[in-house]
Amino acid sequence: MNIQYTEEQLQTGKQIRQMAETSPYKYKAFYKTPEWERKRREILKRDHNACQECKRKGKYRKADTVHHKKHLKDWPELALTDSNLESLCRDCHEEIHPERHKRKKDFWTPERW
């Protein structure tokens, strides 16, 4: 797959890779940047704060997450590209990333008497 990136996308990818190499939070550090916060607000506004996955299923649920269709770690050049971002609700995001959002089913410790 031969993708032509814009100069801005190449610069973004370079900055994110450097951030991931130097930060103890790796790629997660990107999500605290002003650029991401601004883009996140733009995408939620663009999608009218509606979960796009629920919308495809004919339902409505408020979105609280902006998802990278092509994952940040693999495609940092597309981190701020509108066409790579979509608004999702928590449940849909967990469905897409079950490995990241493990909910504890039973938080009680077994009694040991």
Image (spheres, helix red, strand yellow):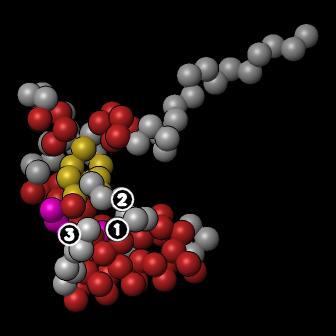
| 88 or 13: nearer the viewer | 13
- The three-letter amino acid code for the residue at tag 3 is Thr
- The three-letter amino acid code for the residue at tag 2 is His
Left or right, 26 with respect to 60, comes to right
x and y percentages locating residue 45 in the rendered image: 12, 56
Q: Which residues are magenta?
A: 79-83
Q: Which mark is residue 75?
A: 1
Most extreme residue toward the top is 113
Badge 1 vs badge 2, beta-carbon distance below 8 Å: yes
Q: Quadrant of the C terminus?
A: top right
Dot 1 falls on a residue whose secondary structure is loop
Q: Nearer the viewer, mark 3 or mark 1?
A: 1
Q: Is residue 90 visible?
A: no
Q: Is residue 59 above or below residue 110?
A: below
| 108 or 76: nearer the viewer | 76
- The three-letter amino acid code for the residue at tag 1 is Trp
| 62 or 71: nearer the viewer | 71
Q: Is residue 81 magenta?
A: yes
Q: Main secondary structure of the magenta part?
A: loop
- Separation (CA) of disc 3 from disc 2: 12 Å
Q: Which mark is residue 71?
A: 2
Q: Is residue 32 above or below residue 94?
A: below
Badge 3 vs badge 1, beta-carbon distance below 8 Å: no
Dot 3 falls on a residue whose secondary structure is loop
Q: Which residue is mark 3?
A: 81
Residue 85, located in which quarter of the rendered image?
A: bottom left
x and y percentages locating residue 28 in the rendered image: 48, 64
Residue 106, located in which quarter of the rendered image?
A: top right
The answer to which of marks 3 and 2 sits earlier in the sequence is 2
Residue 4, located in which quarter of the rendered image?
A: bottom left
Q: Is residue 43 magenta?
A: no
